[in-house]
Amino acid sequence: MLDPVIQLLLSLGFSLLFIVAGVHKLSNRLRFQGIIEAYQVLPKSWTPLIVITIGLIESVLGIAWLTGNSVLIPLTSAVLLSIYVVVISINLYRGRTYIDCGCGFSAFAGKTEVDSGIQQLSFGLVLRNFLLIALAIIAILPSTERVLGAVDYFGIVVGLLTVLLIYAAANQLLSNHNAIGAWRNVSG
């Protein structure tokens, strides 16, 4: 059984992750369409529908993590993340590491075309998604019944901020790793 603080922290974290990702994809549909096409796993004619579908699914999942208490929410999240793992892995196997994963938030800088800050495909992304899948599955566990106090809510706020900083740092490290690899290829 999970402590309700952990359960709430997981729900808030996944909610924030999926809402931001869904809104990001829906507000940058043309850019995301190019990314989906670069994966080359679906017919090009499906891409506009897939772009909207992924954005809507992520947005709905984000809202569901906040409002729902169903086992289907973490399971659907795990399935979606598993699909991402498979598609990334297919392209890693093909040697196509130069593709933007489509999960970065560089386009929030306010520019229409952003060339820097992309997250290229890497095994780090696969590992990150496996960790997120594990956390989603853990969220299925029932939580204990106890009343949350002020210290619990303070812990949730601090915990959420910490998780956000760790997630952002991990994403930045993945982007930096890609940039360093590109520099080495140019100079070497």
Image (spheres, rainbow, N blue to C red):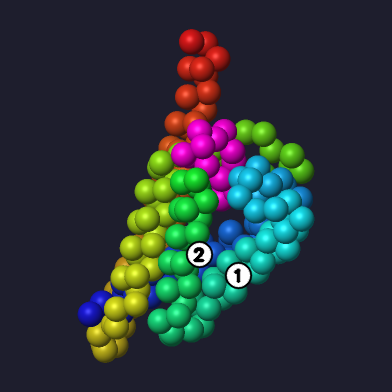
Image quadrant occupied by the N terminus: bottom left
**CA separation, marks 2 and 1?**
9 Å
Q: Residue at x 76, y 55 (%)?
A: 45
Tell me the amino acid under the disc marked 2: Leu
Rendered view: 76 above or below 95: below
Q: Residue at x 73, y 51 (%)?
A: 44
Question: Which secondary structure lies at badge 2?
Answer: helix
Q: Which comes before the other along the chain, label 2 or label 1?
A: 1
Residue 141: quarter of image:
bottom left
Q: Which residue is mark 1?
A: 57
Question: Which secondary structure lies at badge 1?
Answer: helix
Q: Which residue is mark 2?
A: 80
Q: Residues within 10 Å of mark 2 (few under 14, many from 20)?
A: some
Give residue 144's position: percent from left, percent from top. Answer: 25, 85
User: Is residue 9 in sight in this rendering?
Assistant: no
User: Is residue 1 in sight in this rendering?
Assistant: yes
| Residue 12 is inside the magenta segment | no
- Callout 2 touching callout 1 (CB < 8 Å): yes
What range of the chain is rendered magenta? 91-104
Give residue 119's position: percent from left, percent from top. Answer: 54, 40
Q: Judge left or right: residue 1 versus residue 8.
A: left
Rendered view: 77 above or below 48: below
Give residue 40's position: percent from left, percent from top. Answer: 63, 45
| Residue 95 is inside the magenta segment | yes
